[in-house]
Amino acid sequence: MKSTFLLFVLALCCCSIASSAEPREDWNRTFGGPHADGAWCLQETEDGGYILVGNSASRGEGSDLFLIRTNSTGKCTWSRTWGGASEDAGYFVQETRDGGFIVTGSTKSYSMGEELLWLLKTDSNGNMSWEKTFGGFVSSAGDGGWAVNETDDGGYIITGYTQSKGMGRKDLWLLKTDGQGNKIWDRTFGGRNDDVGMSVLQSRDGGYIVAGRTASFTKGGDDIWLLKTDLFGKEQWNRTFGDSQDDAGFQVLEAKDGYVLVGRTESGSDKMKIILIKANQEGRKLWERTYSGSSASSLQPTAEGGYVIAGRIDNVDTGRDALIIKTDSAGREEWSITLGGRGDDIGTFAIQDRDGSYAMAGITDSYGMGREDAWLVKIAAEPQMMEDGTEFRHIEFADS
């Protein structure tokens, strides 16, 4: 009986091809005041809400780090700003195993010269547990953090850039701290030109994988840079991807058989495109895909093994719009959607929620109260539909 029914289902699937309707915007929320505000990173929290981090100039005293907690419908439950009279910002946030949040960014308000790398830990209600700054007194562009990841030992790994250490103008900076933010070690990587780390993860072997850009080791302009270290930050290998034009990497993920990273490329084209690269465990390129879009800033996994990318697309007539691209596991585009209005809007971070829908953080000039606002958009997940109009569902058979 089981075999007969299975054959019937397979025959039905062969006669009716499943298609996926394009997702649609469910709701969008803005956060901020009369001046420039924005969100750079987004995570879904354990309770089904969201945590966003970015910057806010709405206090009228330079730019402050802006941390926002919402419920599942995007309603703000609390927000916090930290900073002084100068420029401060948060670029990455992660919910920690204790239910709090770890944030990295940069601060100029609490430095003796230019900006410092800033690391902050809060509890679940956004109350500051501790904060640390790293860097030195320099007369150039200073130091900053672009990404942080909680490590297996309860500490943190941070990447960004430094001009107070290293060889060049900016060097890729990798720092390891304990659970209280105390530095255990730090490493710099780079040459005479600007080199920056944009994304870091602890890999399954206990070491670290970093993505970013390098102008020191290139074929021309900037190149995408992928760097692998051991547990102590000692380089195991590094790879560059690019050609004679500017290329940059923004976020890396570990796959079962290697690494996937997203960025932007001008190589081989007269305009910028979004690029997705799959590399093996030694960093050698297996494939690459490019997509219409001016730049990508985030890459996150989806439940079925694909990827969701956030970025922007530039249009001569409408300006900038936010862009979300969904791919399968081989990087083939399944759908894309643009979001925005009459002003300039960009997507900075997109995720798939546990319920199968999607959420995007960004910066909008089209909606909200001020010149720019932090932006959170919910994208409803559409069911797959058969050509006869019935909903396609995954069927699991019990043993007979």
Image (cartoon, helix red, strand yellow):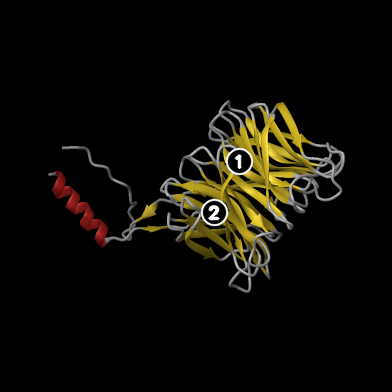
Residue 150 circle label: none
Amino acid type at image mark 1: Gly
Q: Do callouts 1 and 2 mark residues in contact (Cβ within 8 Å)?
A: no
**Residue 47 rendering spot, x and y as whole percentages:** 54, 31
Q: Is residue 125 above or below residue 66?
A: above
**Residue mark closest to the camera, 1 vs 2:** 1
In this rendering, position of residue 345 left or right of residue 329: right
Q: Residue at x 28, y 45 (%)?
A: 395
Q: Quadrant of residue 222?
A: bottom right
Task: Name the secondary structure under disc 1.
Answer: loop
User: Seen in the image, is 371 located left or right of residue 383?
Assistant: right
Q: Earlier in the sequence, mark 1 or mark 2?
A: 1
Q: Which residue is mark 2?
A: 261
Secondary structure state at the residue bearing disc 2: strand
Q: Nearer the viewer, residue 77 or 273?
A: 273
Q: How many marks?
A: 2
Instruction: Determine if residue 32 is in view.
Output: no
Q: Which residue is mark 1?
A: 233
Is the N terminus in the top left, top right, bottom left or bottom right quadrant?
A: top left
